[in-house]
Image (spheres, grey):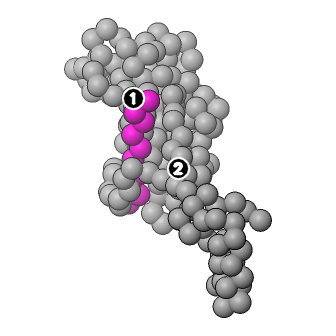
Amino acid sequence: MRSWPCVRKSAASSLIAVLLATGASPAPACGAPAKKKSQEASLAGLRPGKDKLKTAVNIHGPYYRKAVPDSDSVLVWIDAAKHRSLRVEVDSQGVIRSVMVSAIDPLISDESQPVAALPSRTIATGKGLRIGYNVHDDVTETYGDPDGAANSVRYGHTVKVLSYSFEKSPQTMEFLCQVPGGRLLQVTLAAGGS
């Protein structure tokens, strides 16, 4: 018999007998424990707040470009063949502040710029989730219940936004899942603070 810490064994036995006799399913009297939220440290092999741009270049190659023409702070790798992108935001010291992998980034369709192959294994989360392959349920199974969830429109796509905050890191993570269907379209991991 399963042990329920907030119900004594004799009371638990009586409760189960009553529930089974009435056709109800037994459940712990004190409620099911909440699933512990899983922490995340990296996205696309990069650790925001710790790694520098040099690490991103070593992993993904030198074929990046500026996402904003007059700024060196947001850089992007485009894989037009597989329709996905990798963006990193760096601070003035070259430390990566955020990493985003996306299948809906509008820059993907700009064929006038250099492109880079981004193998799926290199743009996954540290726990192995990948855009285009995983779905909403995989996110909640892997990371637990989100701190926030809401429908939104991003780049012309209706998405469910799942937000996580990891105090231990400290970092924030955001998943965009397609509505309907739940396919994972974009993931962002950002370092907390500055």
Real-space CA distance between mark 1 and mark 2, rounded to the nearest whole angstrom: 17 Å
**Above or below, comparing residue 168 to residue 194 in the picture:** below
Percent across and percent down for residue 20 are 71, 84
Q: Quadrant of residue 153?
A: bottom left
Q: Residue at x 27, y 21 (%)?
A: 194
Percent across and percent down for residue 174 are 41, 43
Q: Is residue 64 magenta?
A: no
Percent across and percent down for residue 119 are 63, 31
Q: Is residue 163 magenta?
A: yes
**Secondary element at tag 1:** loop
Q: Amino acid at mark 2?
A: Gly
Determine the residue located farthest toward the right in the rendered image: 1
Q: Residue at x 56, y 24 (%)?
A: 45
Q: Earlier in the sequence, mark 1 or mark 2?
A: 2
Which secondary structure class fits the magenta region best? strand
Report the residue marked by disc 1. 170
The answer, for residue 83, to whether it is visible in the render is no
Q: In the image shown, does 39 or 153 lie closer to the viewer?
A: 39
Q: Which residues are magenta?
A: 157-168
Q: Residue at x 53, y 65 (%)?
A: 30
Q: Quadrant of residue 109?
A: top left
**Left or right of 127, for residue 174:** left
Report the residue marked by disc 2. 144
Q: Are marks 1 and 2 in contact (CB under 8 Å)?
A: no
**Above or below, comparing residue 152 to residue 117 in the picture:** below
**Left or right of 193, for residue 86:** right
Q: Amino acid at mark 1?
A: Pro
